[in-house]
Amino acid sequence: MLKYSIKRVILALITAFIILSLTFLLVRSLPISAAAAGSKENVIRAFMLQQQEFGYVQFYSTPQSDLGKLIVEFHGYDGDEYVYAKPIIEQYFSWLKNIFTKFDWGISISIEPESTALEIIARKLPTSMYINIVAVVVSVPLGIALGILAGLKKNTWVDHLISTLVMIFISIPSFVVISFLMYIFCFKNNLLPPKWPSPADTLQNRVLGYVIPVMALSFGSICGYTRFVRAELCEVMSSEYLLLARTKGLTKNQAITRHALKNAFVPILPSILAEFIGIFGGSMILEKLYSIPGIGNLYIQAINTKDYNVLMVDMAIFVTVGLLAGIILDLSYGFIDPRIRMGEKR
């Protein structure tokens, strides 16, 4: 098990390195305009000096047509200066050096000029975490409860009703759900805030601001857990060892609580652990539609404004969360069920 865990961690690190490297090479192939860097001359100058320090660009007093793509060209202060991007591969190795030696991901060029990308992420991440924590706390017990109810009432009208509703809601994307919720509860009936409340808003509005995003995030999870729990419970209920337990004198309720639910939760608990790891992820479209200042909205904003330094940090968060959830999901099977162990010896 230890050997398998080490292999998975190493594989995840290699995968993250490849994904982030490809992302850097692709985004650095796009030009940075003076407008993207800001309208104030000192902001542009500060950003360009930082880029020169990081090894991404080089200043010249005269045009150098053979030194790569021109990304920003200024005139009129500190003499005439021309700023040229270094070759992408040189920028890539400079980027790696800055991260591994100083853990410096650069500064923002448009979202919050002169603020570091890590500082911006640190301010945005808690909002996404809080929303996802509430969504997980709501969706996990509701999904499990509905799944158990549907499994115990198999082939009855209760099971058919729950299964039908699950199929309907699981087919609807979250951005459609939140648009519908905003129309009904915000614009039509004016019961909930139409966008994410500011920190200066009243406590009541800040609490009500969680309702729509949590509902939009929870619908899919509730449906997923309901289907999963129902399927596992129905399979366990028809197993031979459960029938044997009934023949030994256990009542139906005793067989369900002592054997059926316990064994049905073996594959369910790892997915719950992975769900809690996913609270760092955020939701891009949902946060954008509801104006939530989280890392999902920040990701789209960084793409639109070509703020590549912020984009890379945000991408690193999403990649890390996804890979970490996968590792936790795989390893938890072996810890929850001793019969499932990874190893070479039999």
Image (tube, rainbow, N blue to C red):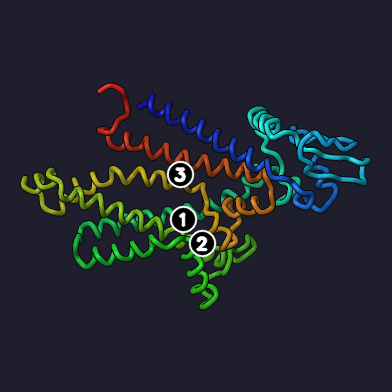
Mark 1 is on which residue type? Val
Q: Mark 2 vs mark 1: which is more N-terminal?
A: 1
Q: CA distance from mark 2 to mark 1?
A: 8 Å
Q: Mark 3 vs mark 2: which is more N-terminal?
A: 2
Instruction: Count how many numbered circles sit on residues in the image.
Output: 3
Q: Secondary structure at mark 1?
A: helix
Callout in the foreground (1, 3):
3
Q: Residues within 10 Å of mark 1 (few under 14, many from 20)?
A: some
Q: Residues within 10 Å of mark 2 (few under 14, many from 20)?
A: many
Q: CA distance from mark 3 to mark 2?
A: 20 Å
Q: Quadrant of the N terminus?
A: top left
- Check if mark 3's residue and mark 2's residue have beta carbons within 8 Å: no
- Residue 194 percent coordinates (x, y): 57, 69
State the mark number for residue 210.
Answer: 2
Callout in the foreground (3, 2):
3
- Residue 44 percent coordinates (x, y): 81, 46
Mark 2 is on which residue type? Tyr
The residue furthest bottom is 189
Q: CA distance from mark 1 to mark 3?
A: 13 Å
Front in this rendered view, residue 244 or 89: 89
State the mark number for residue 134.
Answer: 1
- Check if mark 2's residue and mark 1's residue have beta carbons within 8 Å: yes
* Residue behind mark 3: 277
Mark 3 is on which residue type? Ile
**Residue 326 picture quarter:** top left
Q: Compared to 218, does 64 lie above or below?
A: above
Q: Mark 1 vs mark 3: which is more N-terminal?
A: 1
Q: Compared to 158, does 305 lie above or below?
A: above
- Residue 63 percent coordinates (x, y): 87, 38
**Residue 169 picture quarter:** bottom left
